């Protein structure tokens, strides 16, 4: 849960922001009505993802709140009723994330949307490719202010090596003029590699013109900016590209996910699982079935049963977060993992222990599960599932709430 500090003297605005922030399951709002109460919260042991502040407070009428919050290294959004171009530039130069006026409900939604973007940025890796150390530092400073994880390289060759080493890099920002491999050749090589089909690429150049911009974009860049640029334009472009990419991922994932549990569906399980086996790595299959699920459905109804499946799948994804989790059918799930066998079994034990401790829905229903496991570095996914399924059957018929495991040979 991320805390958001809200400092606003208007009770109505505080109420609106509280509602919008608390509607997001990741956020908790901390409300203050003046600088003194905000300072008290900042001096506590709490950690804040961001702050939303008004410039005109009873004990800080001239925007003093901004300097105070920034001094605690808390990313800050200014929300105010006053629009002044000179003040806006001054605040942005100080380091606030944005300056938004209280024009309508959309303004408040825009603030919360920016905070949500900041949360997502914390896990977003960005690669900056530029042979100028000054430019690297400039871009790195701005990107880190918005929460991104930043890595810098000096040319396109180093950029390709960095992408090979870290598949989690989501965004590349590259200058055009670089030694060894320039930005234009870099984007062409990236788009020729299927591994990087979802990578966002933004080109930069101090010699920008319409021809160069078109050349970059036709070669696969998502966007292009001419230097120098004001940082507001830079972030609008970058954040817009990220949002578009996330929308495309959601559309694509919708075809692969089970709509109730938000785990992968059976079709994706077999398609992607077979690809995992082709790598030659030892693969472990875990089949998990909720014990006595039908009587729960019969007693409490299918609506409660659906709630249980949702809660069960959330717990599964939390414990097997590095693995592929799929709904095999009904109350049966399959986990496919390439991790060390002992590690998978350790997680399985922890998962079962946690499941026994919890109760679910308003009826305080407790659950257990039975599990069958198989593991091998050859054969088909269907073979591994068949072996695990036989062990699941054995677990069910020998008392339930247990794991039957053995490495397949």
Image (tube, rainbow, N blue to C red):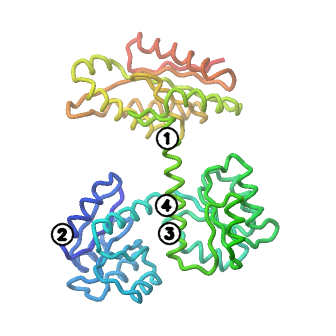
Q: Earlier in the sequence, mark 2 or mark 4?
A: 2
Determine whether the residue tagged by mark 2 lies in a helix, strand or loop: helix
Return the residue nearer the eye: 403 or 276. Answer: 276
Residue 236: image tag? 3
Q: Label 2, label 1: how many angstroms apart (C-alpha)?
A: 41 Å
Return the residue nearer the eye: 46 or 291. Answer: 291
Question: Residue 271: x percent and y percent?
Answer: 60, 29
Residue indicated by mark 2: 12
Comparing marks 1 and 4, which lies closer to the viewer? 4
Structural crowding at the residue carrying mark 2, measured as other residues with C-alpha within 10 Å and reported as few (<14), some (14–19) or many (≥20):
few
Residue indicated by mark 1: 321
Structural crowding at the residue carrying mark 4, measured as other residues with C-alpha within 10 Å and reported as few (<14), some (14–19) or many (≥20):
some
Residue 121: image tag? 4
Q: Label 1, label 3: how many angstroms apart (C-alpha)?
A: 32 Å
Q: Are marks 2 and 1 in contact (CB under 8 Å)?
A: no
Q: Label 2, label 4: how many angstroms apart (C-alpha)?
A: 30 Å
């Amino acid at each position: 849960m991320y805390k958001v500090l809200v400092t606003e003297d208007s009770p109505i605005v505080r109420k609106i922001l509280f509602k919008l922030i608390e509607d997001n399951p990741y956020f908790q709002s901390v409300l203050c009505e003046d600088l003194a109460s905000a300072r008290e919260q900042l001096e506590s042991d709490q950690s804040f993802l961001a702050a939303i502040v008004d410039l005109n407070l009873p004990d800080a009428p001239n925007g003093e709140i901004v300097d105070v919050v920034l001094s605690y290294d808390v990313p800050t959004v200014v929300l105010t009723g006053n629009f002044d171009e000179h003040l806006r530039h001054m605040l942005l130069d100080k380091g606030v994330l944005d300056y938004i006026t209280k024009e309508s409900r959309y303004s408040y939604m825009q603030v919360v949307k920016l905070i949500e973007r900041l949360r997502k940025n914390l896990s977003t890796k960005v690669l900056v490719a530029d042979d100028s150390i000054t430019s690297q530092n400039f871009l790195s400073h701005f990107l880190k202010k918005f929460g991104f994880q930043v890595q810098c390289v000096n040319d396109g060759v180093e950029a390709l090596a960095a992408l090979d080493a870290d598949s989690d890099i989501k965004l590349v920002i590259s200058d055009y003029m670089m030694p060894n491999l320039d930005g234009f050749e870099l984007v062409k090589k990236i788009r020729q590699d299927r591994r990087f089909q979802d990578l966002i690429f933004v080109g930069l150049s101090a010699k920008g013109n319409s021809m160069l911009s078109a050349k970059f974009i036709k070669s696969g860049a998502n966007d292009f900016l001419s230097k120098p640029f004001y940082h507001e334009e830079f972030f609008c472009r970058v954040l817009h590209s990220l949002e578009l990419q996330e929308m495309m991922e959601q559309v694509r994932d919708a075809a692969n996910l089970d709509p109730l549990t938000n785990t992968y569906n059976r079709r994706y399980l077999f398609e992607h699982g077979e690809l995992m086996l082709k790598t030659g790595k030892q693969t472990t299959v875990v089949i998990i079935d909720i014990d006595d699920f039908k009587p729960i459905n019969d007693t409490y109804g299918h609506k409660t049963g659906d709630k249980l499946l949702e809660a069960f799948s959330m717990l599964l994804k939390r414990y097997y977060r590095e693995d592929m989790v799929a709904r095999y059918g009904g109350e049966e799930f399959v986990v496919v993992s390439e991790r060390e066998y002992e590690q998978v079994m350790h997680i399985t034990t922890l998962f079962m222990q946690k499941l026994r401790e919890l109760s679910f829905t308003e009826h305080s229903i407790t659950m257990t599960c039975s599990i069958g496991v198989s593991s091998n570095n050859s054969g088909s996914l269907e073979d591994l599932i068949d072996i695990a399924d036989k062990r699941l059957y054995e677990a069910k018929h020998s008392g339930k709430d247990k794991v039957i495991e053995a490495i397949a040979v």
